[in-house]
Image (cartoon, rainbow, N blue to C red):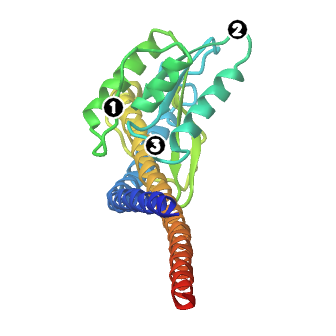
């Protein structure tokens, strides 16, 4: 009985240490989420306005075409899968990986694909499943997302797109709604899609120069900032998912601790009862003698 009590006590101590770790991770993620949430909410209006400007430019000429906007027959698709570098974030990474696999499996016969994983988890997943990679290297995603790294990624994507190594670029990422809801989203990055029949109520702009010349500069900037916004979105989703996962883990650990302490107290009570029974039994024998 004493041995069982010691084992239970050891489990209680170990579980309490685990609960301390998960609670600390929950607090850290909550703090990081505040910054990430502010970053994506501040960035979304900028992206919306940038898209409006590009759409306004494209609407100037109904017959206008640009290599980054023109649709062409799909022979090959590049999937950009945005994940995290770290785990312990619930279904955050697995949802992106599942959506990637689903998208690849649903490709029509004759259509090829390449994958550009962003984040260590997506890279490890694509290597494990032996997917065709655009570049066999890890693109890390730090908490403080560096725009210069994203710019390098975009240059690689645009260069290969213009060389017609693929005809469409689809980004798979986690879209942040709120602290409890993060949905997997897929968005077409290339060709750039705009509504040429622009709503007349939207802002009108005056441009100095030819549309193509302006778009040659504006489109890469728009594409860079678009995928940067997806990564900011993903980062906020990561922190929210990890915060929720660590809260659940802490709650579960607390429940386990309560059950173990109840078991430990019962074991002690039984041990004490047995000791008292032995003492009373011994005293009775002495009195009889």
- N-terminal label among 1 and 2: 2
Q: CA distance from mark 2 to mark 3?
A: 33 Å
In depth, the one of 242 and 73 nearer the eye is 242
Quarter of the picture containing the C terminus is: bottom right
Depicted 61 relative to depicted 182: above or below: above
Which numbered disc covers residue 140? 1
Q: Badge 2: how crowded within 10 Å, few (<14), some, or many (20+)?
A: few
Residue name at image x 70 percent, y 19 percent: 107
Q: Residue at x 66, y 12 (%)?
A: 111
Determine whether 219 is above or below 267 in the image: above
Q: Secondary structure at mark 3?
A: helix
- Cα separation between marks 1 and 2: 32 Å
- Kindly tell me whether residue 179 is visible in this rendering: no
Residue 18 shows in the view: yes
Q: Residue under circle 2?
A: 110
Vertical arrangement, residue 31 with respect to residue 145, above or below: below
Mark 3 neighbour class, 10 Å CA radius: few under 14, some 14 to 19, many 20 or more? many
**Drawn side of residue 161 relative to residue 152, left or right:** right
Q: Which residue is mark 3?
A: 51
Across and down, in percent, residue 114 comes to: 53, 16
Please tell me which residue is depicted at 41% across the width and 61% down the height of the picture: 19
- Distance Cα–Cα, label 1 vs label 3: 27 Å
Mark 2 or 3: the one toward you:
2
**Which of these two is toward me, 146 or 225?**
146
Q: Answer yes or no: do the residues labelled 2 and 3 have beta carbons within 8 Å?
A: no
């Amino acid at each position: 009985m004493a041995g069982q009590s010691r084992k239970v006590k050891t489990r209680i101590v170990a579980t309490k240490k685990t609960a301390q770790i998960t609670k600390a991770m929950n607090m850290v993620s909550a703090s990081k989420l505040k910054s990430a949430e502010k970053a994506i909410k501040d960035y979304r209006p900028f992206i919306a306005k940038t898209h409006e400007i590009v759409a306004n430019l494209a609407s100037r000429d109904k017959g206008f075409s640009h290599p980054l906007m023109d649709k062409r027959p799909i022979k090959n698709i590049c999937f950009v899968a945005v994940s995290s570098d770290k785990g312990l974030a619930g279904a955050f990474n697995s949802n992106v990986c599942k959506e990637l696999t689903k998208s690849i499996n649903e490709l029509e016969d004759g259509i090829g694909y390449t994958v550009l994983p962003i984040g260590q988890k997506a890279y490890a997943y694509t290597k494990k499943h032996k997917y065709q990679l655009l570049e066999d290297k890890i693109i890390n995603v730090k908490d403080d997302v560096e725009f210069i790294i994203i710019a390098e990624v975009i240059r690689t994507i645009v260069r290969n797109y213009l060389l017609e190594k693929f005809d469409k670029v689809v980004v798979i990422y986690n879209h942040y709604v709120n602290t409890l809801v993060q949905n997997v989203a897929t968005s077409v990055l290339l060709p750039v899609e705009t509504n040429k029949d622009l709503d007349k109520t939207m802002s009108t702009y005056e441009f100095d120069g030819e549309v193509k010349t302006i778009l040659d500069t504006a489109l890469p900037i728009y594409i860079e900032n678009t995928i940067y916004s997806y990564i900011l979105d993903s980062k906020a989703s990561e922190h929210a998912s990890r915060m929720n996962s660590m809260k659940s883990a802490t709650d579960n650990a607390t429940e386990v601790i309560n059950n173990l302490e109840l078991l430990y107290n019962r074991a002690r009570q039984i041990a004490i009862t047995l000791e008292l029974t032995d003492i009373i039994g011994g005293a009775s024998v002495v009195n009889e003698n």
